[in-house]
Amino acid sequence: MSEPIKVDITTLREKTSLFPPEAFHFVREGLAHTVDALHGDTKDLPDDDRHVSGQQLCLGLRDFAIRRYGMLAITVLSRWGVHRTDDFGKIVFAMIESGQMRKTDEDTLDDFRGVYDFGEAFSSVEVG
């Protein structure tokens, strides 16, 4: 009898997406929201002038989530497995690796680490 195959579940899960398609759509739409908020009308701007940093994107995604989902924002994100800004970074870099987004040489996954605490960032959502 042969030895059982050992699978490194942690590595496998890191290499595959832990997030549903809705989370990717949200980040894509949230990126457009963030670019518009920071740069205004970008139709005549070169791509380099539309860039946003990881920190800026995290803040824009917070604003976008609140606008879209209100008090349920943290609940919706949690259902998608998004619990911290690092998760936004994982989604963004998965999209970069698949060619759906681009990055500069300076952009890293670390740009998304600990930008804000979800509990604090979404606790002050006002109704209406």
Image (tube, rainbow, N blue to C red):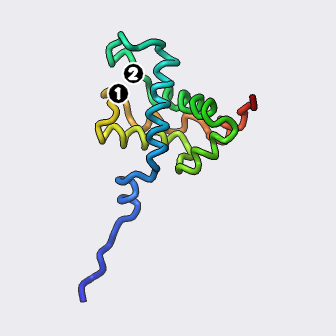
Q: Is residue 12 above or below residue 76?
A: below
Q: Quadrant of residue 125?
A: top right
> Badge 1 local density, few (<14 within 10 Å), some, or many (20+)?
few
Q: Which residue is mark 2?
A: 51
Q: Residue furthest right?
A: 127
Q: Is residue 6 above or below residue 17?
A: below
Do callouts 2 and 1 mark residues in contact (Cβ within 8 Å)? no
Q: Which quadrant, please, contains the C terminus?
A: top right
The percent position of residue 89, horizontal first and vertical second, equals 44, 39
Give the residue drawn at x 45%, y 30%: 54
Q: Residue flagged by tag 1: what amino acid is it?
A: Glu
The percent position of residue 7, horizontal first and vertical second, equals 34, 69
Between residues 77 and 55, which one lies in front from this camera angle?
A: 77
Give the residue drawn at x 36%, y 39%: 95
Q: Which quadrant, please, contains the N terminus?
A: bottom left
Regarding mark 1 in the picture, which secondary structure is present there? loop
The percent position of residue 35, horizontal first and vertical second, equals 46, 21
Q: Residue furthest bottom?
A: 1
Q: Nearer the viewer, mark 2 or mark 1?
A: 2
Give the residue drawn at x 40%, y 58%: 13
Q: Is residue 86 left or right of residue 71?
A: left
Regarding mark 2 in the picture, which secondary structure is present there? loop
Cα separation, mark 2 vs mark 1, equals 11 Å
Between residues 42 and 120, which one lies in front from this camera angle?
A: 42
Q: Quadrant of residue 42?
A: top left
Q: Residue flagged by tag 2: what amino acid is it?
A: His
> Badge 2 local density, few (<14 within 10 Å), some, or many (20+)?
some
Between residues 4 and 66, which one lies in front from this camera angle?
A: 66
Q: Is residue 70 above or below residue 49?
A: below
Q: Which residue is mark 1?
A: 106
